[in-house]
Image: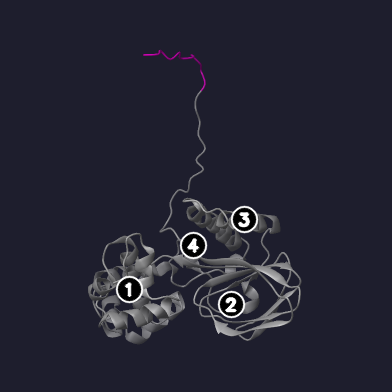
């Protein structure tokens, strides 16, 4: 055994904590697609509706589009974040190029169902001007990792995406962001109660009347509160909760699509698949196949 010398001093060891004192459920950005686009001539990408988030970062030229019917113009260092359910139409001139990456935020917490932005924002509010070098450095790193075909590449891309997404979030004024994004402490007490109730009924089919009685509200009052807090009706919030749970089960267990459908109280696997496709741009069998050893059946 090697003896360790101790040095006698009269000092003390002080520490400064750099960790968060408390944190809620983590939000996990998941990369769907990523690339650089360049218009070789005037080009119109016809009106379409988004199922996921998409960030557009101009590289050269002036990027124009219509978002929910309003025309927007972007140039460096601005970034546009298109959110799920937005209607989007690109209006591109020759020479315009831009980065674009789409992602979803994985979290089944009702606190975060309201999404990235606060209710009532305008398309102009979805434009931000983050620190240009920071965003473009992260995009270049992501591109490099995408071109590196080793076992850790996907993990590193996800890690870079997280830094990129939260760097972008920080660049928006606080008042345009949804409370769920920050996990603010002043959360309406209805949300945790409703979430616990959803958790206890996730394997069942429930009615809005049953939800309202459990919350001590009328169906109308519950609907108003849910629209204010979550931006959606109570029934849709419950369905979204079930679909998030279904995706967790498909990814994290050996249950197949039929078993998950039965476990969560859907009428049959076909009904389950239809509902799942309203929330994700792929069927539940795709999730199972993406899991190591998954067969999709």
Disc nearer the start of the sequence (4/2): 4
Q: Main secondary structure of the magenta part?
A: loop
Eye-nearest disc, 2 or 3: 3
Eye-nearest disc, 4 or 2: 4
**Label 3 belongs to which residue?**
138
* Residue 35 position (above or below residue 150): below
Instruction: Decide if residue 74 is on the left or right side of residue 245.
Output: right
Q: Residue 242 carries which label?
A: 1
**Label 2 belongs to which residue?**
121
Disc nearer the start of the sequence (4/1): 4
Measured Cα–Cα span from mark 4 to mark 2:
22 Å
Instruction: Decide if residue 142 is on the left or right side of residue 94.
Output: left
Specify whether residue 234 is in view.
no
Q: In which quarter of the image is residue 87?
A: bottom right
- Residue 213 or 255: which is nearer the viewer? 255
Eye-nearest disc, 2 or 1: 1
Numbered disc 2: secondary structure: loop
Q: Evaluate if marks 2 and 3 touch, with contact meaning CB atoms under 8 Å apart.
A: no
Q: Where is residue 254 shown, x and y percent of the image? A: 27, 62
Measured Cα–Cα span from mark 4 to mark 3:
15 Å
Q: Residues within 10 Å of mark 2 (few under 14, many from 20)?
A: few
């Amino acid at each position: 055994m090697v003896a360790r010398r101790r040095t006698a001093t009269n000092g003390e060891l002080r520490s400064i904590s750099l960790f968060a004192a408390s944190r809620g459920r983590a939000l996990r950005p998941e990369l769907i697609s990523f690339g650089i686009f360049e218009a070789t001539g005037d080009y119109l990408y016809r009106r379409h509706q988004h199922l996921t988030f998409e960030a557009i970062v101009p590289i050269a030229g002036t990027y124009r589009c219509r978002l929910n019917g309003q025309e927007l113009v972007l140039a460096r260092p601005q970034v546009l974040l298109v959110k799920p359910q937005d209607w989007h139409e690109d209006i591109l001139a020759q020479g315009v190029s831009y980065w674009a990456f789409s992602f979803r935020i994985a979290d089944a917490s009702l606190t975060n169902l309201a999404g990235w932005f606060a209710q009532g924002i305008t398309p102009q509010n979805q434009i931000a001007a983050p620190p240009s070098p920071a965003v473009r450095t992260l995009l270049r790193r992501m591109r490099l990792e995408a071109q590196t075909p080793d076992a850790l590449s996907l993990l590193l891309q996800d890690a870079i995406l997280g830094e990129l997404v939260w760097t972008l979030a920080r660049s928006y004024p606080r008042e345009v962001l949804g409370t769920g994004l920050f996990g603010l402490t002043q959360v309406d007490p209805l949300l945790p109660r409703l979430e616990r109730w959803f958790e206890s009924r996730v394997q069942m089919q429930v009615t809005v009347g049953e939800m309202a009685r459990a919350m001590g509200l009328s169906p109308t009052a519950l609907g108003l509160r849910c629209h204010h807090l979550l931006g959606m009706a109570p029934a849709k919030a419950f369905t979204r909760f079930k679909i998030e749970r279904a995706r967790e089960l498909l990814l994290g267990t050996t249950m197949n699509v039929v078993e998950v459908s039965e476990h969560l109280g859907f009428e049959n696997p076909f009904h389950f698949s239809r509902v799942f496709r309203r929330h994700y741009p792929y069927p539940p069998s795709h999730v199972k196949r993406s899991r190591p050893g998954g067969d999709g059946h």
